[in-house]
Image (spheres, rainbow, N blue to C red):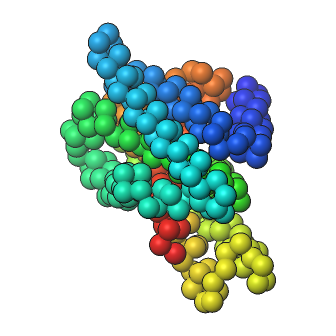
Amino acid sequence: MKQRIITGIILGVAALLAILFLPTSLFSLLLFLISVIGLFEWSNLLKLSGMQKRVYIGVGSITLLLVVGALLLGNRETDQIVGGLALFVRSNPLLFGLLLLMSLFWLMMPFILSIYARRPLSFLTNREFLFVVSILSLAALMITLTVLQQGLILLLYLILLVIIADSGAYFVGRKFGKRKLAVTISPGKSVEGAIGGIVLAGLFSLAAILYFTSDETAIFIAQERMMLILNFVSLSLLVVIISISGDLFESVVKRHAGMKDSGNILPGHGGVLDRIDALTAAAPLFFVGLSFI
């Protein structure tokens, strides 16, 4: 536990410094490096070796590099425009199309997992299926986090939202958990814990949007304040539910691979994927949702 806390503090400080002080170009490159580590962890989860592993890492790295290149190009073209990179991504059919695709994938995940909990679905652990999903999910995460870094408060909000939901689920589940959420997938998670995490995240979301719409200079500006509040809180709650599904999805993959953690690069926390599984599912949906509010 001590090692877990120390690692968590170091990760938190490092992430905050990167978000606050790195320019967009360096931030996107940092995300690329983290994503490549994620590719190696995925290759282990998929039990790839030899040529298969090299092909997977190669295809994944090239895909992620193309995404970085597109983001850097978009950032250069819109450097003088407030929120320019977000506008660039929304107007780019490939980048925004990828975010839409992954958002739909994660939106379906709760229903897929509810079926999987009763009877196995072979496609969910199919190597070729996961080959594609893993690369696209990392690419979508890179796009979203890079764009949201320019809207600093939104990125910090998203990260805090996921952390509060996860922590709330852990502590509420530990104290009051009786009914298993998905015993065949992740025996440690409870229905009470999930509800607790969702409620706490919802309260945080409500407090945040009330604060930022409290006057005419607010970040979130709308003629119909109550409608904006309702939409934002609803989106946040949906994002939290999907973040739980992202966590459970990785649990399915790890159980199928016979692995407790995706890696061991982070003492006390496992691998990179273990830390970003919920965020990977939540981030694209959050950005896409904001685009339509």
Left or right, residue 282 beside residue 155: left
Left or right, residue 183 beside residue 267: left
- Residue displayed at 72% across by 40% down: 22
For the image shown, how many numbered marks are present on the structure? 0
Q: Quadrant of the N terminus?
A: top right
Q: Answer yes or no: is residue 68 visible.
A: yes
Closer to the camera in the image, 270 or 193 = 270
- Which residue is situated farthest in the bottom direction here? 224
Closer to the camera in the image, 100 or 250 = 100
Image quarter for residue 57? top left
- Residue displayed at 63% across by 84% down: 222
Residue 179 in the image: state x and y as whole percent: 47, 54
Residue 61 vertical position relative to residue 136 in the rendered view, above or below = above
Residue 90 in the image: state x and y as whole percent: 46, 61
Left or right, residue 41 beside residue 275: left
- Residue displayed at 58% across by 73% down: 233
Residue 189 vertical position relative to residue 226 in the rendered view, above or below = above
Q: Answer yes or no: is residue 255 visible.
A: no
Image quarter for residue 217? bottom right
Closer to the camera in the image, 203 or 105 = 105
- Residue displayed at 43% across by 36% down: 66
Residue 133 vertical position relative to residue 181 in the rendered view, above or below = above
Residue 192 in the image: state x and y as whole percent: 54, 59
Residue 116 in the image: state x and y as whole percent: 28, 47
